[in-house]
Amino acid sequence: QRYRKRYLDLLMNPEVKKTFERRSKIISEIRNFLDEQEFLEVETPTLQPIYGGAAARPFKTHYNVLGKDFYLKISDELYLKRLIIGGFEKVYEIDHNFRNEGMDKSHNPEFTMMECYWAYADYWDIMELTEELFAYVTKKTLGTTKIEWQGKKIDLKPPWKRLTMFEAIKKYLGWDPEKITDSELKKKLEKKGKKIVGGFNRGLAIAALFEDVEPNLIQPTIIYDFPKETTMLCKIHREKDYLIERFEPYIAGFEVANAYSELNDPHKQREFFKRQVEMKKAGDNEAHPMDKDFLEAMEYGMPPTGGLGIGIDRLVMLLTDQDNIRDVILFPTLKPKND
Protein backbone atom coordinates (compact mmCIF):
# COMPACT_ATOMS: atom_id res chain seq x y z
CA GLN A 1 0.00 0.00 0.00
CA ARG A 2 2.88 2.38 0.71
CA TYR A 3 4.19 1.89 -2.84
CA ARG A 4 0.76 2.00 -4.50
CA LYS A 5 -0.25 5.17 -2.64
CA ARG A 6 3.07 6.95 -2.36
CA TYR A 7 1.33 10.27 -1.75
CA LEU A 8 -0.07 8.90 1.55
CA ASP A 9 3.30 7.33 2.38
CA LEU A 10 4.95 10.74 2.01
CA LEU A 11 2.26 12.44 4.10
CA MET A 12 2.37 9.92 6.93
CA ASN A 13 6.09 9.12 7.07
CA PRO A 14 8.45 12.13 7.20
CA GLU A 15 11.52 9.85 6.95
CA VAL A 16 10.32 8.64 3.53
CA LYS A 17 10.16 12.22 2.27
CA LYS A 18 13.72 12.77 3.56
CA THR A 19 14.92 9.72 1.62
CA PHE A 20 13.68 11.17 -1.66
CA GLU A 21 15.03 14.62 -0.86
CA ARG A 22 18.41 12.96 -0.37
CA ARG A 23 17.99 11.10 -3.66
CA SER A 24 17.62 14.40 -5.50
CA LYS A 25 20.69 15.76 -3.72
CA ILE A 26 22.72 12.67 -4.71
CA ILE A 27 21.83 13.06 -8.39
CA SER A 28 22.64 16.78 -8.27
CA GLU A 29 26.06 16.05 -6.78
CA ILE A 30 26.81 13.41 -9.42
CA ARG A 31 26.15 16.09 -12.04
CA ASN A 32 28.29 18.60 -10.15
CA PHE A 33 31.20 16.15 -9.95
CA LEU A 34 31.09 15.24 -13.64
CA ASP A 35 30.65 18.86 -14.69
CA GLU A 36 33.71 19.81 -12.62
CA GLN A 37 35.62 17.03 -14.42
CA GLU A 38 34.58 18.69 -17.72
CA PHE A 39 32.21 15.95 -18.85
CA LEU A 40 29.41 17.19 -21.10
CA GLU A 41 25.85 16.08 -20.27
CA VAL A 42 24.00 14.81 -23.36
CA GLU A 43 20.76 13.03 -24.27
CA THR A 44 20.31 9.88 -26.35
CA PRO A 45 17.13 8.24 -27.75
CA THR A 46 14.84 6.31 -25.43
CA LEU A 47 13.15 4.56 -28.36
CA GLN A 48 15.76 2.78 -30.48
CA PRO A 49 15.53 0.73 -33.70
CA ILE A 50 18.17 -1.68 -32.30
CA TYR A 51 18.68 -2.13 -28.58
CA GLY A 52 22.18 -2.69 -27.24
CA GLY A 53 24.91 -1.89 -24.76
CA ALA A 54 24.05 -4.60 -22.22
CA ALA A 55 23.01 -8.21 -21.85
CA ALA A 56 19.27 -7.82 -21.28
CA ARG A 57 15.88 -8.58 -22.75
CA PRO A 58 14.22 -5.37 -24.04
CA PHE A 59 10.70 -4.01 -23.99
CA LYS A 60 9.32 -3.81 -27.52
CA THR A 61 6.96 -1.18 -28.89
CA HIS A 62 5.76 -0.15 -32.35
CA TYR A 63 6.10 3.08 -34.30
CA ASN A 64 2.83 3.41 -36.24
CA VAL A 65 4.05 6.22 -38.50
CA LEU A 66 7.14 4.19 -39.47
CA GLY A 67 5.52 0.78 -39.46
CA LYS A 68 8.50 -0.55 -37.50
CA ASP A 69 9.12 -2.16 -34.14
CA PHE A 70 11.32 -0.15 -31.78
CA TYR A 71 12.76 -0.91 -28.34
CA LEU A 72 13.03 0.98 -25.08
CA LYS A 73 16.71 1.53 -24.33
CA ILE A 74 18.48 -1.00 -22.15
CA SER A 75 21.63 1.16 -22.06
CA ASP A 76 23.00 4.48 -23.34
CA GLU A 77 26.32 2.92 -24.32
CA LEU A 78 26.29 2.63 -28.10
CA TYR A 79 24.90 6.12 -28.66
CA LEU A 80 27.36 7.71 -26.23
CA LYS A 81 30.20 5.90 -28.01
CA ARG A 82 28.98 7.40 -31.28
CA LEU A 83 29.54 10.81 -29.67
CA ILE A 84 33.08 9.84 -28.69
CA ILE A 85 33.63 8.83 -32.31
CA GLY A 86 32.19 12.20 -33.33
CA GLY A 87 34.85 14.10 -31.40
CA PHE A 88 33.47 14.67 -27.92
CA GLU A 89 36.10 13.55 -25.41
CA LYS A 90 34.01 13.40 -22.20
CA VAL A 91 30.26 12.75 -22.20
CA TYR A 92 27.68 11.50 -19.70
CA GLU A 93 23.97 10.87 -19.42
CA ILE A 94 21.65 10.31 -16.46
CA ASP A 95 18.35 8.77 -17.47
CA HIS A 96 16.04 5.77 -17.25
CA ASN A 97 16.85 2.40 -18.77
CA PHE A 98 14.35 -0.41 -19.26
CA ARG A 99 15.10 -4.13 -19.00
CA ASN A 100 12.39 -6.74 -19.36
CA GLU A 101 13.51 -8.86 -16.43
CA GLY A 102 12.49 -9.96 -12.96
CA MET A 103 11.91 -7.79 -9.91
CA ASP A 104 13.59 -8.24 -6.54
CA LYS A 105 15.11 -6.16 -3.74
CA SER A 106 17.86 -4.82 -6.00
CA HIS A 107 16.19 -4.86 -9.44
CA ASN A 108 13.39 -2.78 -10.95
CA PRO A 109 12.63 -3.10 -14.71
CA GLU A 110 12.73 0.70 -15.05
CA PHE A 111 15.77 2.14 -13.31
CA THR A 112 18.04 5.19 -13.34
CA MET A 113 21.56 4.91 -14.72
CA MET A 114 24.50 7.25 -15.12
CA GLU A 115 26.85 6.36 -17.97
CA CYS A 116 29.97 8.32 -18.86
CA TYR A 117 32.69 7.85 -21.48
CA TRP A 118 36.18 9.35 -21.48
CA ALA A 119 38.33 9.34 -24.61
CA TYR A 120 42.03 8.47 -24.24
CA ALA A 121 41.39 6.82 -20.85
CA ASP A 122 41.34 3.15 -19.83
CA TYR A 123 39.88 1.12 -16.98
CA TRP A 124 42.67 2.17 -14.59
CA ASP A 125 41.69 5.82 -15.10
CA ILE A 126 38.02 4.93 -14.64
CA MET A 127 38.78 3.11 -11.37
CA GLU A 128 40.17 6.33 -9.92
CA LEU A 129 37.26 8.35 -11.33
CA THR A 130 34.78 5.93 -9.73
CA GLU A 131 36.41 6.12 -6.29
CA GLU A 132 36.54 9.91 -6.47
CA LEU A 133 32.91 10.19 -7.61
CA PHE A 134 31.53 7.99 -4.83
CA ALA A 135 33.59 9.78 -2.16
CA TYR A 136 32.66 13.23 -3.50
CA VAL A 137 28.93 12.52 -3.66
CA THR A 138 28.89 10.91 -0.21
CA LYS A 139 30.83 13.77 1.39
CA LYS A 140 28.65 16.42 -0.26
CA THR A 141 25.44 14.62 0.67
CA LEU A 142 26.23 13.35 4.17
CA GLY A 143 29.18 15.49 5.24
CA THR A 144 31.42 12.39 5.58
CA THR A 145 32.62 9.42 3.56
CA LYS A 146 31.60 7.07 6.37
CA ILE A 147 28.17 5.49 6.18
CA GLU A 148 26.21 2.82 8.01
CA TRP A 149 24.15 0.44 5.89
CA GLN A 150 21.94 -2.15 7.57
CA GLY A 151 24.21 -2.15 10.63
CA LYS A 152 27.43 -2.35 8.61
CA LYS A 153 29.93 0.51 8.99
CA ILE A 154 31.47 1.37 5.62
CA ASP A 155 34.02 3.98 4.57
CA LEU A 156 33.96 5.13 0.93
CA LYS A 157 37.19 7.11 1.17
CA PRO A 158 39.72 6.21 -1.57
CA PRO A 159 41.73 4.20 -2.27
CA TRP A 160 39.49 1.13 -2.33
CA LYS A 161 40.59 -2.48 -2.10
CA ARG A 162 41.30 -4.05 -5.50
CA LEU A 163 41.25 -7.74 -6.43
CA THR A 164 41.12 -9.51 -9.77
CA MET A 165 38.12 -11.80 -10.13
CA PHE A 166 40.44 -14.81 -9.99
CA GLU A 167 42.16 -13.51 -6.83
CA ALA A 168 38.78 -12.96 -5.17
CA ILE A 169 37.63 -16.50 -6.01
CA LYS A 170 40.84 -18.00 -4.62
CA LYS A 171 40.59 -15.88 -1.46
CA TYR A 172 36.91 -16.40 -0.65
CA LEU A 173 35.98 -19.69 -2.36
CA GLY A 174 39.27 -21.56 -2.08
CA TRP A 175 39.79 -22.76 -5.65
CA ASP A 176 41.94 -21.51 -8.51
CA PRO A 177 40.05 -20.48 -11.69
CA GLU A 178 43.20 -20.91 -13.78
CA LYS A 179 43.83 -24.49 -12.62
CA ILE A 180 40.32 -25.92 -12.27
CA THR A 181 39.26 -28.32 -15.05
CA ASP A 182 36.10 -27.93 -17.12
CA SER A 183 34.63 -31.08 -15.54
CA GLU A 184 35.23 -29.68 -12.05
CA LEU A 185 33.58 -26.40 -13.10
CA LYS A 186 30.56 -28.28 -14.40
CA LYS A 187 30.25 -30.11 -11.08
CA LYS A 188 30.37 -26.84 -9.16
CA LEU A 189 27.69 -25.34 -11.44
CA GLU A 190 25.48 -28.39 -10.96
CA LYS A 191 25.94 -28.31 -7.20
CA LYS A 192 24.92 -24.63 -7.10
CA GLY A 193 22.01 -25.16 -9.50
CA LYS A 194 23.43 -22.72 -12.03
CA LYS A 195 22.99 -23.14 -15.80
CA ILE A 196 24.78 -21.45 -18.68
CA VAL A 197 22.38 -20.52 -21.49
CA GLY A 198 23.48 -22.03 -24.80
CA GLY A 199 25.68 -24.70 -23.20
CA PHE A 200 28.80 -24.80 -21.05
CA ASN A 201 31.25 -21.92 -21.40
CA ARG A 202 34.32 -21.77 -19.18
CA GLY A 203 34.45 -17.98 -18.76
CA LEU A 204 30.73 -17.63 -18.09
CA ALA A 205 30.90 -20.54 -15.62
CA ILE A 206 33.65 -18.82 -13.62
CA ALA A 207 31.68 -15.54 -13.61
CA ALA A 208 28.53 -17.34 -12.47
CA LEU A 209 30.35 -19.03 -9.59
CA PHE A 210 31.95 -15.70 -8.61
CA GLU A 211 28.50 -14.62 -7.40
CA ASP A 212 29.18 -16.56 -4.19
CA VAL A 213 32.03 -14.11 -3.47
CA GLU A 214 29.80 -11.03 -3.54
CA PRO A 215 28.35 -11.23 0.02
CA ASN A 216 31.92 -10.98 1.37
CA LEU A 217 32.59 -7.63 -0.30
CA ILE A 218 31.27 -5.25 2.36
CA GLN A 219 33.94 -2.53 2.28
CA PRO A 220 34.37 -0.88 -1.16
CA THR A 221 36.17 -3.38 -3.37
CA ILE A 222 36.98 -3.18 -7.06
CA ILE A 223 36.86 -6.57 -8.80
CA TYR A 224 38.69 -6.40 -12.13
CA ASP A 225 39.94 -8.52 -15.06
CA PHE A 226 36.87 -10.60 -16.01
CA PRO A 227 36.73 -13.61 -18.37
CA LYS A 228 36.43 -12.32 -21.94
CA GLU A 229 33.09 -14.11 -22.48
CA THR A 230 31.29 -11.85 -19.97
CA THR A 231 30.87 -8.95 -22.38
CA MET A 232 31.54 -8.30 -26.05
CA LEU A 233 31.92 -4.51 -25.85
CA CYS A 234 35.12 -4.54 -23.82
CA LYS A 235 38.78 -4.46 -24.89
CA ILE A 236 40.75 -7.70 -24.58
CA HIS A 237 43.27 -7.63 -21.73
CA ARG A 238 46.64 -6.22 -22.80
CA GLU A 239 48.55 -9.19 -21.29
CA LYS A 240 46.11 -12.13 -21.01
CA ASP A 241 43.95 -12.83 -24.06
CA TYR A 242 41.40 -14.88 -22.09
CA LEU A 243 40.47 -11.83 -19.99
CA ILE A 244 38.99 -8.37 -20.63
CA GLU A 245 39.78 -5.02 -19.06
CA ARG A 246 36.56 -4.78 -17.06
CA PHE A 247 35.82 -4.00 -13.43
CA GLU A 248 32.86 -3.83 -11.07
CA PRO A 249 32.95 -2.10 -7.68
CA TYR A 250 31.14 -3.83 -4.81
CA ILE A 251 29.88 -2.21 -1.62
CA ALA A 252 27.81 -3.83 1.13
CA GLY A 253 27.86 -7.12 -0.77
CA PHE A 254 26.38 -5.96 -4.08
CA GLU A 255 27.55 -4.49 -7.36
CA VAL A 256 27.13 -0.71 -7.70
CA ALA A 257 28.74 -0.04 -11.10
CA ASN A 258 30.23 -1.59 -14.22
CA ALA A 259 33.15 -0.27 -16.26
CA TYR A 260 35.78 -1.15 -18.82
CA SER A 261 38.34 -0.17 -21.39
CA GLU A 262 36.06 0.04 -24.39
CA LEU A 263 36.60 -2.12 -27.44
CA ASN A 264 37.46 0.22 -30.33
CA ASP A 265 38.47 -2.28 -33.03
CA PRO A 266 35.53 -2.56 -35.50
CA HIS A 267 36.75 -5.89 -36.90
CA LYS A 268 36.86 -7.55 -33.47
CA GLN A 269 33.55 -5.91 -32.58
CA ARG A 270 31.94 -7.41 -35.68
CA GLU A 271 33.19 -10.89 -34.74
CA PHE A 272 31.86 -10.49 -31.20
CA PHE A 273 28.48 -9.38 -32.57
CA LYS A 274 28.38 -12.48 -34.78
CA ARG A 275 28.98 -14.72 -31.74
CA GLN A 276 26.15 -12.98 -29.92
CA VAL A 277 23.82 -13.66 -32.86
CA GLU A 278 24.72 -17.35 -32.63
CA MET A 279 24.05 -17.29 -28.88
CA LYS A 280 20.62 -15.76 -29.51
CA LYS A 281 19.85 -18.56 -31.99
CA ALA A 282 20.89 -21.04 -29.25
CA GLY A 283 18.26 -19.60 -26.92
CA ASP A 284 20.00 -16.76 -25.08
CA ASN A 285 17.30 -14.06 -24.90
CA GLU A 286 19.78 -11.56 -23.48
CA ALA A 287 22.32 -11.86 -26.31
CA HIS A 288 23.23 -8.67 -28.17
CA PRO A 289 21.80 -8.11 -31.68
CA MET A 290 23.97 -7.14 -34.63
CA ASP A 291 24.23 -3.35 -34.89
CA LYS A 292 25.58 -2.51 -38.37
CA ASP A 293 25.14 1.24 -37.92
CA PHE A 294 27.32 1.23 -34.80
CA LEU A 295 29.94 -0.87 -36.60
CA GLU A 296 30.02 1.65 -39.45
CA ALA A 297 30.52 4.46 -36.93
CA MET A 298 33.44 2.55 -35.38
CA GLU A 299 35.06 2.17 -38.80
CA TYR A 300 35.50 5.95 -38.98
CA GLY A 301 37.79 5.70 -35.95
CA MET A 302 37.05 5.39 -32.24
CA PRO A 303 39.79 6.53 -29.86
CA PRO A 304 40.81 4.41 -26.86
CA THR A 305 38.05 5.05 -24.33
CA GLY A 306 37.11 4.25 -20.76
CA GLY A 307 33.45 3.85 -19.84
CA LEU A 308 31.49 3.69 -16.57
CA GLY A 309 27.90 2.90 -15.66
CA ILE A 310 26.51 3.49 -12.16
CA GLY A 311 23.12 2.29 -10.96
CA ILE A 312 21.74 5.41 -9.30
CA ASP A 313 19.06 3.53 -7.39
CA ARG A 314 21.61 1.24 -5.72
CA LEU A 315 23.81 4.20 -4.83
CA VAL A 316 20.79 5.88 -3.23
CA MET A 317 20.06 2.66 -1.31
CA LEU A 318 23.58 2.82 0.13
CA LEU A 319 23.42 6.47 1.12
CA THR A 320 19.93 6.27 2.65
CA ASP A 321 20.36 2.93 4.47
CA GLN A 322 17.64 1.15 2.48
CA ASP A 323 17.77 -2.56 1.59
CA ASN A 324 14.95 -2.55 -0.98
CA ILE A 325 15.11 -0.71 -4.30
CA ARG A 326 11.38 0.07 -4.05
CA ASP A 327 12.15 2.34 -1.10
CA VAL A 328 14.29 4.65 -3.24
CA ILE A 329 12.04 4.81 -6.34
CA LEU A 330 9.01 7.06 -5.92
CA PHE A 331 6.77 4.91 -8.12
CA PRO A 332 8.31 1.43 -8.45
CA THR A 333 6.99 -1.26 -10.76
CA LEU A 334 4.38 -3.41 -8.98
CA LYS A 335 2.29 -6.41 -9.83
CA PRO A 336 -1.23 -5.44 -10.97
CA LYS A 337 -3.63 -5.06 -8.08
CA ASN A 338 -6.39 -7.63 -7.98
CA ASP A 339 -9.70 -5.75 -8.03
Image (cartoon, grey):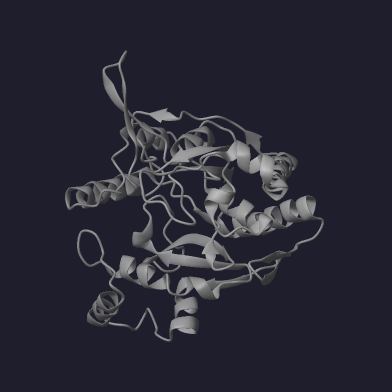
Residue at the right extreme?
Answer: 143
Q: Nearer the viewer, residue 275 or 139?
A: 139
Q: Nearer the viewer, residue 5 or 142?
A: 5
Decide if residue 246 is on the left or right side of residue 133: left
Residue 91 at least partly seen: no
Q: Position of residue 24 (x, y in %)?
A: 69, 41
Q: Residue at x 43, y 74 (%)?
A: 212
Image point 19% across, 52% down: which residue?
Answer: 283
Is residue 172 visible in the rendered image? The answer is yes
The picture places residue 68, in percent across and down from the top left corner, at 27, 22
Residue 160 x %, y %: 66, 68
Find the residue positioned furthest to the bottom: 174
Number of marks: 0
Left or right for 267, reference 34: left
Check the picture and name the quadrant holding the C terminus. Answer: top left
Report whether 137 appears left or right of 311. Answer: right
Q: Whole-percent x and y of residue 150?
A: 63, 67
Of the pair 318 and 266, the residue shown nearer to us: 318
Residue at far left of view: 282
Vertically, is 115 above or below 213? above
Apparent side of residue 329 relative to residue 59 in the rendered image (left or right): right
The extreme front residue here reads: 339
> Could you tell me which residue is drawn at 72 percent across and 58 percent down?
135
Quadrant housing residue 23: top right
Using the image, determine if residue 131 lies above or below residue 57: below
